[in-house]
Amino acid sequence: MQKSRESSKQRILAVLRTAVNRLEFLTTNDWTLIIDKTTPVTFKKQDVLIQAGKRSKIVYLLVEGELKVTAAGTEVARIGPGGICGEMAFLENTIASATVTAEKEVEAFAIEWEKLADLFELFPHLASRFYRSLALNLSRRLREQIS
């Protein structure tokens, strides 16, 4: 089991390094610390990862597959490998503003908010790079919406 988990960690590190929506200010060491606190999860097509109006307290890092993000019944984004979801509710410590659904089978890593907070307390520079990366990612997503 441990060997399989190590292989999965290496796979997600490779995906996240090359993905367009990666959190680009994070270092390889940052990713190693984060991935160590995650749980691998799989979702089938049409499974809901995040439900608008509910609090899940989990951030997902997508490894394979595609996610559809809808708000008030309107598709607002698609997320592919290397993308992240659940980050807005995490940033605001609130309920989800959108529903995230698997468009096909999805492999992801889930990290609980509490585990992220613990990491950030231990490694403040990791927190700084993580939040900066989220800000840039969200800014780009917004820019795509208004273009």
Image (cartoon, helix red, strand yellow):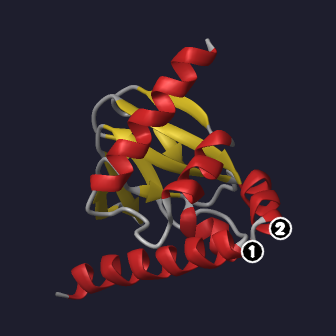
Outermost residue on the front side: it is 29
Q: At numbered mark 2, what does the secondary structure look like: helix, strand or loop?
A: helix
Question: Could you say which is closer to the camera, residue 68 or residue 84?
Answer: 84
Q: What residue sits right under mark 2 in the picture?
A: 121
Query: Image quarter for residue 1?
Result: top right
Q: Residues within 10 Å of mark 2 (few under 14, many from 20)?
A: few
Secondary-structure class at tag 1: helix
Looking at the image, the residue that sits furthest to the left is 147
Q: What is the quadrant of the C terminus in the image? A: bottom left
Q: Going by the image, does 119 lie left or right of 95?
A: right
Q: Which residue shows up at 78% across the image and 62% down it?
A: 117
Q: Position of residue 90 (x, y in %)?
A: 65, 66
Q: Amino acid at mark 2?
A: Glu
- Return the x and y of residue 146 as percentages of the image width and height: 23, 88
Which image quadrant is residue 120 in? Answer: bottom right
Q: Residue placed farthest to the top in the image?
A: 1
Q: Residue at x 29, y 50 (%)?
A: 80
Indicate which disc residue 62 carries.
none
Q: Amino acid at mark 1?
A: Pro
Marks 1 & 2, CB-CB < 8 Å contact: yes
Instruction: Decide if residue 51 is in sight here.
Output: no
State the image coordinates of residue 58 (x, y, percent, origin top left).
65, 50
Establish if 134 lies above or below 81.
Answer: below
On residue 124, which mark appears?
Answer: 1
Image height check: is 111 above or below 124?
A: above
Residue 133, given in percent of the width and then of the height, sits at 48, 75
Residue 61 in the image: above or below residue 126: above
Left or right position of 90 against 69: right
Q: Is residue 99 visible?
A: yes
Q: In the image, what residue occupies the spot 27% across and 54% down?
A: 18
> Seen in the image, is 98 located left or right of residue 111?
left
What is the C-alpha distance between the residues marked 1 and 2?
6 Å
